[in-house]
Image: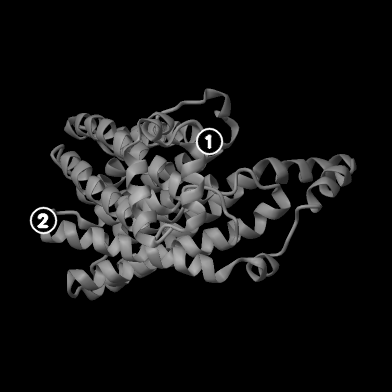
Amino acid sequence: MRQGGRSYAALRHVTRRQSWHDAVHVDLNKAGVAAPLRVGAAVTLVFVVSGLTGHHTLAGFGALGALVAAFCRPDPYPVRVGRLMVLGVAMPVSVGIGAVLGVVGGPELVGIAVISLLAGAAAYLVWSLHIVGPGAVVFMFAAVGAESFAREARDVIWAVAMTSGGAVVGVLASLAPWLLRGLRSAVTGRSVAAEQKSSSVRRESIRRTLARAPHRVLVARAARITVAGALAAGIAVTAGFSHPMWAAMGAVAAMQGIGYHVAVHRGVQRLVGNVGGAVLAAGLLALPLDYWGAVAAIIVLQTVAEIMSTVNYALCSLAVTPMALLMTSLGSGLSPAVAVDRVLDTGIGIVTGLIIAALTISGADVERLYSQA
């Protein structure tokens, strides 16, 4: 089948009733609590310390760093360590890139191009290291937030420092059960060799994992994400929307799944979740919440989002949307009307992402679609 026929089949798949039914399917048996609670605890600690020390406008960057705890949840702890270390560096780097863009200023299209390239690089990184979690869109969100915040050199330093501190908290929170078992073993003298033996089978160095990755395929996929993000933001700019990078994030979020069918599911789920989340966000932004009120809402929403991430991405987005807007409002303040912009921008991004995915779909993906018909 030629590429034109593949793309047509892919676009038809979006309109299939089964595609929408599968996208809104909920499986509560997949819900977990322990890992989400550790993520919530890490974010809580960062917000509390930031609030008590008076760094209210910087608290969001610390929380973004702490979100590294949301990655690598299925990985055995010895494998998780190296991957979390990479993420703990990647998150501050993303914030630093965005903050530098904010200080330098310049044409809006330059910022769109740089952050879209960052999204592609982040996607390549998580794919090549087999990192499970929120994906490249988190690094993109961090860079966008830093670009809006930073206006002078010291802002860059503070943002990167807060993100780095939060990342340390996030890594420790993710590894907490393993570290505590090791500490208990050291104190009691009991060996944990059996656990180490079972997990060492799947242990692999970062270097070896990168060496085994299908780089040519992943580079092509990362390039698609870069193009989709930049194109979605460009369309939003042309349409006169105030937050074009939200459109770029919508495209990236939809496309960061490996297969086209996953992109369709994530796109539908993110769109449905954003509509409901925008309504919730508008209500929360209309309330006279102070720092601590906003933080309490963010922590609850973040924990719910982590629990729902394995159940259904629409429910996850339902919590993520107001959480992200509340986190953004800590540094700049937002009106309830911004929730409408969020839905429109995200809609543009999702549609753009799915079209790009359809135009570049592989033969293997088309066969998978037909097998599901």
Quarter of the image for residue 356 reads bottom left
The reply to whether dot 2 and dot 1 touch (C-beta < 8 Å) is no
Q: Compare residues 2 and 278 and report the one nearer the observer.
A: 2
Q: Residue at x 71, y 47 (%)?
A: 76
Residue 337 vertical position relative to residue 7 in the rendered view, above or below: above
The quarter of the picture where the N terminus appears is: bottom left
Residue 283 makes an appearance in the image: yes
Q: Position of residue 89 (x, y in %)?
A: 52, 64
- Identified by mark 2, the residue type is Ala
Residue 87 makes an appearance in the image: no
Residue 190 vertical position relative to residue 229 in the rendered view, above or below: above
Q: Position of residue 88 (x, y in %)?
A: 53, 59
**What is the CA distance from the residue labelled 2 to the residue labelled 1?**
38 Å
Label 1 residue SS: helix
Q: Which mark is residue 239?
A: 2
- Identified by mark 1, the residue type is Pro
Q: Residue at x 16, y 40 (%)?
A: 340
N-terminal label among 2 and 1: 1
Q: Is residue 338 left or right of residue 69?
A: left
- According to the picture, the residue beneath numbered tag 1 turns out to be 36
Q: Compare residues 356 and 328 and report the one nearer the observer.
A: 356
Q: Position of residue 247 (x, y in %)?
A: 25, 53
Label 2 residue SS: loop
